[in-house]
Amino acid sequence: MLSKELVRQQIEEKLKRKVASDPKLHQVHMLIHSDKLNIHWPMAAGKTDEAPVNPHQPFHTASVGKTFTSVIVAKLVERGLAKFEDPIARYLPSTILEGLHLFKGKDYTYDIQIKHLLNNTSGVPDYFEDKPKRHRAFMQDILEDPSRFWTAEETIQWSKQHLEPRFPPGKGIHYTDTGYNLLGLIIESITSKPYHEILHDYIFRPLQMRHSYLSHYSESAVQSEYPIAHVYLNHLKVNIDEYRSFSSFYAGGQAVCTTEDLLLFMKALVENRLVKPEILNAMQNWNKMWPGMEYGYGLMRMRFIPFTQKYLAWGHLGASGAFMLYFPNLDVYAMGSFNQTAYRSKSMNYLFFNVLRKVSKID
C-alpha cells in the first residue's frame, strides 16, 4: 500500500511526462476526488498557446453535456411537466417532425418517445458522426465555415436531408447528437425558455457552477482568469469560442466548465440532490452500446475490467477526451479532459492504468 502523497506525486509526474512526450497532447486537465480517501487532487499539464495550463482552467466538455440535458429532462419529469414515455410529437412543431424518421418506407416519427432520445434507441441518425452517401461529413461543413452559426433546428434539417434513420424506435441503439438537439428543443417547448437559460436556471446557478456556460449562447457567472483550453482535432487547433460553427453541438454537448464545476454537478447527481432516487434509477436503465459500455438516459456505464465491480464507473465521456465519472465501489470521482479527439478512447486507458489503479492502492 502507498501513501496519498506518494500516489499523487506519481500521478502528476506521469501526466507531465505523457504530455511532454506525445506531440498530439497539448494540455490535459484532471481532478481526482474521494471523500472516503480524503483526497482532492486538481492537476494539469501542458500549455495553452505559450501559457502554462492551470487545473482551474475552463475547457470544452463535449458530450459530457448530454448528462446536463438528460438531468434537465429528468427534473421536468419529476415536476410532472413531462413523462419519459411521452411522444416527442407532443412538443415539437411540424417543421421538425416532417420526415424526421422515415425508415424503409414507413414513418416512425410519431412512435418516438422522449426516453428513446435519452437512451439513443430512437433510430434517428447522428448528424455529427454519421457519413452521408452524397454529401461531405458535417464536421467538414463546420470546419470549412467556422463563422457560420448553426441552430439546433438547422442541424436536425441537415440530418433529415443527408442521412437515413437506422431502425424503428426502440429496436436498436445508435448514439445520436441529433436526438439530443431534439431534446434541447423539447426542453424549450416545455419551459418556454431558451435551452441555455434553463441550463443555468436548473443546474449551473443552483449548484454554484460559476465558471460554466454554453459556448456561443451564454456566459459564466464569474469570468475565469485563465483562457479556455483549446480543443485539438488530431493536429488542428480549435479555439472553441472563436468557432461559431461549434454552436451546432447545442444540447448534445457544448458546455464549457472547469473540473471543479463538473465535480459539483456529479456529486449532486450521485447524492440525489438533483433528482430523486427513483428518477436516477430510471436514468440508469442500461442498454449495451459498445463492448464494455452501456447507455442509460444521458448516462454511460463503463466496466474497465470484465467480471469485477471494482472499477465499474458511470457518468459520461466526450469526443475530445473529456470525462466525468464516478466509481461507486472506490468512492472516487474523476473529472477532466485530454482536449484531443485522438484521445477519445485512449483517455480511458490512461485513466485506468495510470490513475485509478494507483489510487486503489492508497493505504
Image (cartoon, grey):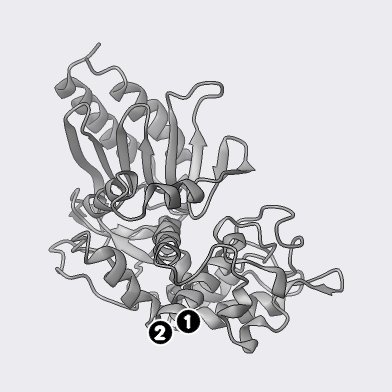
Answer yes or no: do the residues labelled 2 and 1 have beta carbons within 8 Å?
Answer: yes
Residue 98 figure quarter: bottom right
Residue 103 figure quarter: bottom right
Residue drawn at x 37%, y 27% is: 329
Q: In this view, does 284 lie to the left or right of 237?
A: right
Q: Which of 144 and 305 is in front in this view?
A: 305
User: As drawn, which residue projects farthest toward the right?
Assistant: 105
How many other residues sit within 10 Å of disc 1, few (<14), some (14-19) or many (≥20)? some
Vertical placement of 317 versus 363: above or below? below
Q: Is residue 184 left or right of residue 267?
A: right
How many other residues sit within 10 Å of disc 2, few (<14), some (14-19) or many (≥20)? few
Task: Give the labeled residue for mark 1.
Answer: 189
Q: Residue type at mark 2: give it.
A: Ser
Counting from the top left corner in percent of width and height, residue 51 is at 18, 56
Residue drawn at x 62%, y 61% is: 116
Vertical placement of 94 versus 250: above or below? below
Counting from the top left corner in percent of width and height, residue 357 is at 36, 23
Task: Give the labeled residue for mark 2.
Answer: 192
